[in-house]
């Protein structure tokens, strides 16, 4: 059996420029020569086929004038036959290529980047973010700075990093400082707006007459339904129970406890409005007219608690940490200024010094305001979440979420009631029952509030109100 053979180039293809001309490799798995059966390779001999060596060298030789990879590294010399030395890579090739692509995509020259760094201003937030992502590791930066060859032979990415780090060793730290400065105003403004929202939300919860009237109606209805049980005769209830109002259905399943309470409050407000306007409703249609007058009044609940709705969207952890995070960045910039040389970075120092003086004073005031507002939020929780204030302190903003959801429930109930009123030939008796049923507790068998029956807790809550 013939052994497999490797086709070798002839002498003319091997001898060029004093040796074998290197071609691009073809990665394959060679067939093992010693096998116990014949193969197709046994039928191949050296003289059966000849190919054009010059053409293959032209097409696939590393020094070919058509090689696109080598063309990228040629200089712009007027001598077309001269080839520049190969570019020098210090970074991992893929990372070097990615950095070069980002640099090429920036609508700003490298000299302008360096000038902006020296002056401490002049780069957009988007440009700063993209440049920061190009930061080398400490080890990579050390290798680039220690390079002692011809900088003109460095690859694009290495050339950029070499020039910028040689001029400013803390260049990327400075870029981070500039990015923080560009975003500081918006972050500080958002923090101050949130502080104002929280303060107004606490004030709304303190002064909303409609919300207090709804709580009163719920408390009285719950005590009537829970009469004779351990949950009866309550002084107050945990506001977490508000979400259960729509779940408690009447015996016939046609209404809910929430709907019943909303209708009762709407009628009460309608009577007040009729008295205020000195109207005399038609005796046969008095309930309908009271509902018509009262709906717009209760519809103002969302307006009375508009800041509460905004406060419900504030994330507690982010709000608490943002001030300390801003302060930490300021401290970092102070350290950068200490490391920078005034002679090299006078413009940067001047710009950052003025910025730091302004924001340090502002953050001091904001921190004091934040402490005051959080104390106000704490007292509001103690005022409303009697019996559950300790649990609420893990996220004191949950109170605003509870109230926001409840307002949405009331709005929906009012909308349904309004639609029902607009229907023709709908008797008032189908809208609601104006007199409480003697079997109220039986009609709402699933009602299970967590009421505060301890009078001392109510007293404590009242004292908190006085300190509020």
Image (tube, rainbow, N blue to C red):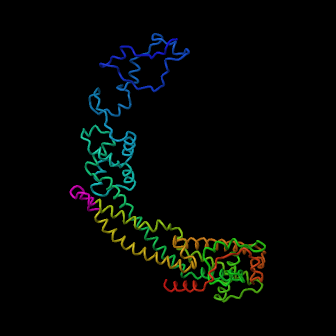
Q: Residue at x 52, y 84 (%)?
A: 465
Residue 275's spot in the image, x, y percent? 66, 89
- Which residue is more in the foreground, 424 or 456? 456
Q: x, y (%) of residue 100?
A: 37, 42
Residue appearing at x 33%, y 64% in the figure: 331
Please check the rendered image and state whether residue 238 is part of the magenta-colored stretch, yes or no. Answer: no
Q: Quadrant of residue 338?
A: bottom left
Q: Say if 289 sits above or below 86 in the image.
A: below
Q: How far across and down, in percent of the image, does residue 175 sit?
A: 33, 55
x and y percentages locating residue 66 in the rendered image: 38, 27
Q: Which residues are magenta?
A: 337-351
Left or right: 188 as drawn, with respect to 456:
left
Q: Is residue 343 magenta?
A: yes
At x 51%, y 76%, the residue is 201
Q: Nearer the viewer, residue 350 or 338?
A: 338
- Most extreme residue toward the top is 47
* Horizontal arrangement in the rendering, residue 439 relative to residue 143 (left or right): right
Q: How many marks?
A: 0
Q: Foreground residue, 45 or 352?
A: 45
Task: Give the dominant element type of the magenta stretch: helix, strand or loop.
Answer: helix
Q: Is residue 384 left or right of residue 94?
A: right
Quarter of the image for residue 415 reads bottom right
Q: Residue furthest left?
A: 343
């Amino acid at each position: 059996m013939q052994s497999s053979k490797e086709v070798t180039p002839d002498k003319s293809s091997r001898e060029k420029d004093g040796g074998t001309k290197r071609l691009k490799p073809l990665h394959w798995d060679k067939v093992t020569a010693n096998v116990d059966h014949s193969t197709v390779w046994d039928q191949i001999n050296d003289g059966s086929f000849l190919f054009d060596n010059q053409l293959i060298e032209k097409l696939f030789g590393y020094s070919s004038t058509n090689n696109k990879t080598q063309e990228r590294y040629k200089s712009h010399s007027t001598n077309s036959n001269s080839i520049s030395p190969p570019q020098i890579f210090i970074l991992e090739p893929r990372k070097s290529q990615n950095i070069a692509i980002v640099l090429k995509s920036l609508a700003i020259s490298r000299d302008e980047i360096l000038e902006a760094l020296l002056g401490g201003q002049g780069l957009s937030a988007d440009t700063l973010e993209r440049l920061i992502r190009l930061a080398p590791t400490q080890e990579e930066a050390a290798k680039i700075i220690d390079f002692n060859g011809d900088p003109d032979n460095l690859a694009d990415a290495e050339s950029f990093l070499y020039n910028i780090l040689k001029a400013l060793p803390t260049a990327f730290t400075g870029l981070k400082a500039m990015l923080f400065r560009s975003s500081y105003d918006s972050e500080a403004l958002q923090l101050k707006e949130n502080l104002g929202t929280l303060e107004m939300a606490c004030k709304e919860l303190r002064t909303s007459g409609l919300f207090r009237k709804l709580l009163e109606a719920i408390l009285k209805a719950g005590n009537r339904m829970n009469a004779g049980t351990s949950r009866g005769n309550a002084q107050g209830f945990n506001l977490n129970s508000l979400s259960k109002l729509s779940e408690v259905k009447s015996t016939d399943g046609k209404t809910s406890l929430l709907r019943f309470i909303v209708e009762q409050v709407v009628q009460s407000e309608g009577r007040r409005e009729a008295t205020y306007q000195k109207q005399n409703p038609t005796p046969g249609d008095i309930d309908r007219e009271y509902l018509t007058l009262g709906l717009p009044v209760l519809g103002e609940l969302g307006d009375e608690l508009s800041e509460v709705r905004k406060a419900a969207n504030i994330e507690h952890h982010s709000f608490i940490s943002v001030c300390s995070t801003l302060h930490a960045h300021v401290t970092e910039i102070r350290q950068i200024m200490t490391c920078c040389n005034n002679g090299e970075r006078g413009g940067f120092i001047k710009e950052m010094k003025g910025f730091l003086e302004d924001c340090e004073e502002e953050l001091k005031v904001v921190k004091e305001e934040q402490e005051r507002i959080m104390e106000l939020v704490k007292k509001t929780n103690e005022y409303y979440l009697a019996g559950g204030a300790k649990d609420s302190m893990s996220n004191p903003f949950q109170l605003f979420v509870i109230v926001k959801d409840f307002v949405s429930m009331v709005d929906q109930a009012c909308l349904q009631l309004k639609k029902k009123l607009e229907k023709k030939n709908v008797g008032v008796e189908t809208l609601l029952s104006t007199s409480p049923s003697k079997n109220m507790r039986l009609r709402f068998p699933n009602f299970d509030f967590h009421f505060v029956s301890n009078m001392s807790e109510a007293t404590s809550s009242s004292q908190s109100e006085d300190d509020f």
